[in-house]
Structures are given as structure tokens and as C-alpha cells.
Amino acid sequence: MIPLLLWRRNWCKFMNIKKGDNVKILKGKDAGKTGKVIRVSEKDNKITIDGLNVFKKHSKPKRQGQKGEIVNVVRPLDVSNAQIVCPSCNKATRVGHRINEKQKTRYCKKCNAAI
Ligand SMILES: [Zn+2]
């Protein structure tokens, strides 16, 4: 059980997408659209993108006489369904990692620029 936990932890550290990144959605109802990541959940590998993957939720009236409302809810989506948009070449790209003794940096696999 311990090796698996360690492996999971290491794998989580290699999350390619960070908060504030611009990403393009590859699958789902908003496929092809781009947006900014506002939340990253490393635990279940999900990201929430500002204004995308919005679903309507019906809320029940809380008090008598009040009407139920339809609320827009932004649902998180799986990281594997999104790709980062490179700020240098403006394309949806895969991300590589460079590790030096001080830190880990991400780079675009299409134009090689650091992200
Ligand atoms: Zn690029």
C-alpha cells in the first residue's frame, strides 16, 4: 500500500496545469473553447475553468411563497480533457518538464518556450 501512495503523491506533483493557466477543453460540451483555470484539485485531478462547463441547477424554494430558481454551476472537469494553451505560440500543447537543481519548470512541447 505504501509504494502506491508514494507513487500517487509523486504523480500529483507532476500536474501539468496550474491555477491561472489558459487551457483549451478537448472533450465535453465546451470542447474547443478556451478559458482560465480558477481552481485545481490535485486530489482528484480536476480543474475548474472560469465560465466554462457550466450546468444549470434547479434550486428548490427555501421559503414558502418563494420561487425555485435556476442557478448556473461551473463544474470541474478532468485534467485529461484539457490542454494548456502556450502563451508564446498560442496553441494548445502538451507540456514538458525541465528539472534543474533549484526548481522544476514547464515548457511547451511545440515551441520549446518556458510556460
Ligand atoms: Zn508554444
Image (cartoon, helix red, strand yellow):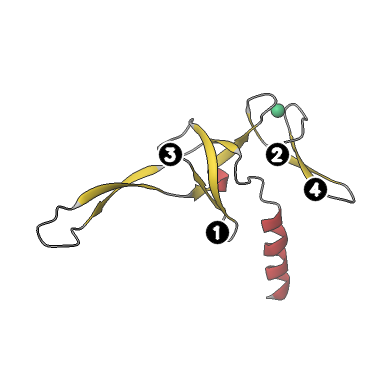
Dot 1: element: loop
Query: Most extreme residue toward the left, as rendered?
Result: 65
The amino acid type of the residue labelled 4 equals Lys
Point out which mark residue 44 bears: 1
Query: Most extreme residue toward the bottom, as rendered?
Result: 1
Describe residue 12's horizontal placement relative to residue 75 as left or right: right
Image location (x, y in percent) of residue 74: 41, 47
The amino acid type of the residue labelled 3 equals Gly
Dot 4: element: strand
The amino acid type of the residue labelled 1 equals Asp
Considering only order in the chain, which callout, 4 or 1, is on the residue closer to the N terminus?
1
**Image quadrant in which the C terminus is located:** top right
Q: Distance between the residues labelled 4 and 2?
A: 12 Å
Q: Residue at x 51, y 35 (%)?
A: 35
Q: How far apart are marks 1 and 3 (CA)?
A: 20 Å
Dot 3: element: loop
Point out which mark residue 104 bears: 4
User: 4 or 109: nearer the eye?
Assistant: 109
Considering only order in the chain, which callout, 2 or 1, is on the residue closer to the N terminus?
1
Q: Residues within 10 Å of mark 2 (few under 14, many from 20)?
A: many
Q: Distance between the residues labelled 3 and 2?
A: 24 Å
Residue under label 2, please give it.
95
Considering only order in the chain, which callout, 2 or 4, is on the residue closer to the N terminus?
2
Image location (x, y in percent) of residue 54: 38, 42
